Image: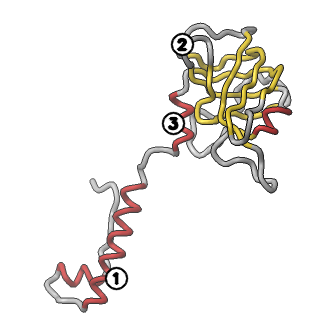
Amino acid sequence: MLKHAITLPAGLRAARDGVRPSGLGLLAGGLLFGLAAFVAGTADAAPEPNYNVRLRADFHIQVELDSFRPPVAYPGECQVSGTVAHVFRSRLSGLEVGDSIEIATPCDVALEGQPPATVADAEELESAPVIEVFLNARDGAAYEMAGSQYMALKAVTDEPMCETERAGIMC
């Protein structure tokens, strides 16, 4: 059974049937066929990278934040510290509710009201009382955000606020 049906453009149908199309018709048909093949090929493509980062992260937790340490210059590496308030997923041992934690993440400040696109928003991290975050373990007892996947929250929640089951949702 065919997974994707592709209708050949008129120029290629003519070529298939033994009729010689004009150069422009063949070019247009080839471009349309290539576009259709690309669309069909990407229909089942892997989810966006952030989704994969969330799936592969060592931990998915909520942290009540105590402190924020900015980098020397922006962009740079911010440090937040606090207390683990909820553990939704843990692929490694050693991180439990009540533990003190320090998290490193690349960060930057918003420009003209637009938050940084690929790193954590320093101002948001500094003002957040709680964050839900995906983490990876570093050497020793240190942790880093997995792909800047976090969400600033007003309070700890019983259920995760960041999606791990669906692609296309930012955390």
Q: Which residue is mark 3?
A: 52
Q: Which residue is mark 2?
A: 92
Q: Is residue 21 above or below residue 79?
A: below
Amino acid type at circle 1 is: Ala
Instruction: Report the quarter where the C terminus lies.
Output: top right
Q: Is residue 121 left or right of residue 149?
A: right
Residue 12 locus on image (x, y percent): 25, 79
Mark 1 and mark 2 lie on one chain; the one further toward the N terminus is 1
Q: Which residue is mark 1?
A: 28
Residue 20 locus on image (x, y percent): 17, 89
Mark 3 and mark 1 lie on one chain; the one further toward the N terminus is 1
Amino acid type at circle 3 is: Asn
Mark 2 and mark 3 lie on one chain; the one further toward the N terminus is 3
Q: Is residue 65 left or right of residue 86?
A: right
Residue 37 locus on image (x, y percent): 34, 64
Q: Are marks 1 and 2 in contact (CB under 8 Å)?
A: no
Dot 2 crowding, Cα within 10 Å, few <14, some 14–19, many 20+ = few
Please name whichever residue, 138 or 132, is drawn nearer the observer in this view of the structure: 138
- Tell me which residue sits at (38%, 69%) in the image: 35
> Which circle, 1 or 2, is nearer the viewer?
2
Residue 96 is drawn in which quadrant?
A: top right
